[in-house]
Image: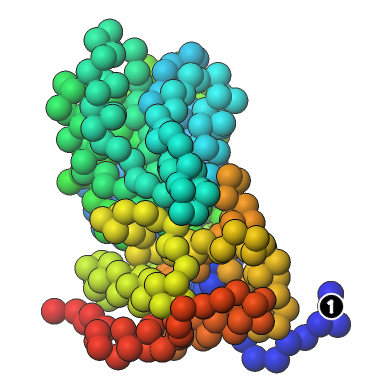
Amino acid sequence: TLDHHPSGRHFLQIPGPSPVPDRILRAMSLPTIDHRGPEFGALGLKVLAGLKQVFQTEHPVVVYPASGTGAWEAALANVCSPGDQLLMVETGHFATLWKKLAERLGLQPEFITLPGTCAQTGLPNAWRHGVPAERIAERLKADTGHAIKAVCVVHNETSTGVTSDIAAVRRAIDAAGHPALLMVDSISGLASAEFRHDAWGVDVTVSGSQKGLMLPPGISFNALSPKALAAARTATLPKAFWAWDEIVEMNQSGYWPYTPNTNLLYGLHEALDMILGQGLDVIFARHQRWAAGVRAAVQAWGLPIQCADPAVYSPVLTGVVTPEGVDADALRKLIHTRFDLSLGTGLGKVKGRMFRIGHLGDCNDLTLMAALSGCEMGLKLAGVPLAGSGVAAAIAHFAAHPAPTAG
Ligand code: PLP
């Protein structure tokens, strides 16, 4: 309520929206300009060029004034025709939502899943692992008529804390000799976890503003390949607002066919300056280091990390499984009320069984230590038996591993 005014800062430690740096907030507060005027074209050209560097692509990146869900729809609407078959993988809640969206568009997604439930945690196995590239290869080999139009996978599954190996998915498609497009959701991976659109042979990368780019929600992206652009020319699902052709055409001079989100583009300009100034490799290493510190804390508490495969631990967030009988949402509520710290809720099939600690965007060792302190105090208040101090383990980790620097 409005009469609740906690002092000090709020700790937004969910895996997106991530904390927005003051520099970006100030840039966004500038007056909105004429989106058909001369200054705007220069801004448009700069952000479009900077985005290509972040996606690591030479090809167009389309910006939509929409949340990530809009960019999911755009990716499918541009390259698919009614009834097209898709191959998707159940990595968690966001993969499931993208599949539902495909069904609503009249497409036929097939869901590869890892069956069974984990004996230790009671969680579905599929929600603890990454994309199994070998099963994609197997399924595509069996599709001798090449009916499958696209393979759609989530790079960083925000509901589980698993970052899948996208280069391996590309190799699987190539090994099967299959022409399917590779479409990847890196909404929560981009600009935090390593992502290489061109080098990994991705045809469409879907992303959003409110995670690694450190912006508020409200704009989202489709990075394209020449093959995706060619597919869009013959695909027959209706597309108007989402259609790439008119946007890519007008973007050549830095403008959009409709009124773009000018102030978010100011913010994006500032974010790109920060990100490219620091260097992507430094940013990726920083997130890996934070993630390792947070995992050290979770392991010291003696609680299971939701991601069951260390090879695919997410550098962006960590899912923490609560003991059977401890309602993770009640714990989150307690921590929010007592310490003004927001943690991510368990989504879909893992609701109430886990919470998520975001370690992305505008963080540092001390903000993460504060978040871990809030978790540890909350766990103790909730009476959860802990094996040891996660805070002490994270302090030891951060002290022993200096932050990466450029060069
Ligand atoms: N995909 C992933 C991996 C996400 O994390 C999210 C949002 O958290 C979405 C898709 C949906 O994006 P939005 O909520 O911006 O529509």
Image location of residue 248, percent across then percent down? 38, 39
In the image, what residue occupies the spot 52% across and 49% down? 122
The answer to whether residue 120 is seen in the rendering is yes
Comparing 375 with 149, the one in front is 375
The answer to whether residue 92 is seen in the rendering is no
Q: Quadrant of residue 149?
A: top left
CA neighbours of label 1 inside 10 A, class few (<14), some (14 to 19), many (20+): few
Image location of residue 137, percent across then percent down? 23, 27
Looking at the rendering, in which quadrant would you find the C terminus? bottom left
Up the image or down, 312 lies above or below 240; here it is below
The image's colouring method is rainbow
In the image, what residue occupies the spot 43% across and 34% down? 115
Looking at the rendering, in which quadrant would you find the N terminus? bottom right
In the image, what residue occupies the spot 28% across and 29% down? 135
Image location of residue 301, percent across then percent down? 46, 76
The mark tally for this picture is 1
Q: Quadrant of residue 3?
A: bottom right
Image location of residue 201, percent across then percent down? 21, 39
Residue kind at label 1, given as amino acid type = Leu
Up the image or down, 357 lies above or below 45; here it is below
Q: Secondary structure at mark 1?
A: loop
Comparing 227 with 336, the one in front is 336
| Location of mark 1 (residue) | 2
Task: Say whether residue 122 is left or right of residue 246.
Answer: right
In the image, what residue occupies the spot 77% across and 86% down? 5
Name the residue furthest top.
145
Task: Say whether residue 238 is left or right of residue 361.
Answer: right
Task: Say whether residue 190 is left or right of residue 172.
Answer: right
